[in-house]
Amino acid sequence: MKNTWAIHQLKTTVNFGAKSKIVNWFTGGLNHQVEHHIFPHISHVHYGKISEIVRDTAKEFNLPYNEYKTTRKAIAAHFRYLRDMGMNPALQA
């Protein structure tokens, strides 16, 4: 693996609708994918506070912190990705 496990998680996971209490409740915290993957044994009720620390730490070390502000934007990005992969499978990372 090119990067450490934690850096790999930051580069390959994306949060969505993380500020929404409804989305957080409905998904059981899985909208906090970054925190869920880095801290799988911590209850989702803490992900909101943990996300602030993870975001600041990622910025400090010039690492990505991927997030879609809304669930709608995440779904739209997912369908764009599927379309793009269908049109040009060589784009797969």
Image (spheres, grey):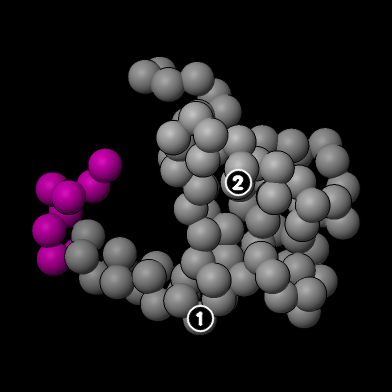
Residue occupying the point 84% across, 41% down: 42
Q: Is residue 82 left or right of residue 26?
A: left
Residue occupying the point 56% across, 76% down: 71
The percent position of residue 89, horizontal first and vertical second, equals 16, 53
Is residue 91 a member of the stretch shown in magenta? yes
Give the farthest residue toward the front: 60
Work out whether residue 49 or residue 24 is closer to the camera in this orientation and state it.
49
Which residue corresponds to mark 2? 55
For residue 62, which quarter of the picture?
Answer: top left
In the image, is residue 2 above or below residue 34? above
In the image, is residue 9 above or below residue 92? above
The percent position of residue 26, horizontal first and vertical second, equals 77, 74
Q: Is the residue marked by circle 1 packed among few (<14), some (14-19), or many (20+) residues within 10 Å?
A: few
Secondary structure, magenta segment, majority class: helix
Which residue corresponds to mark 1? 72
Identified by mark 1, the residue type is: Arg
Q: Earlier in the sequence, mark 1 or mark 2?
A: 2
Work out whether residue 9 or residue 79 is closer to the camera in this orientation and state it.
9
In the image, is residue 25 above or below residue 32? below
Identified by mark 2, the residue type is: Arg
The percent position of residue 64, horizontal first and vertical second, equals 45, 43
Q: Is residue 63 left or right of residue 92?
A: right
User: Can you see residue 26?
Assistant: no
Tag 2 secondary structure? helix
Tag 1 secondary structure? helix
Q: Is residue 85 left or right of residue 22?
A: left
Where is the C terminus found, in terms of image quarters?
top left
Q: Which residues are magenta?
A: 86-93
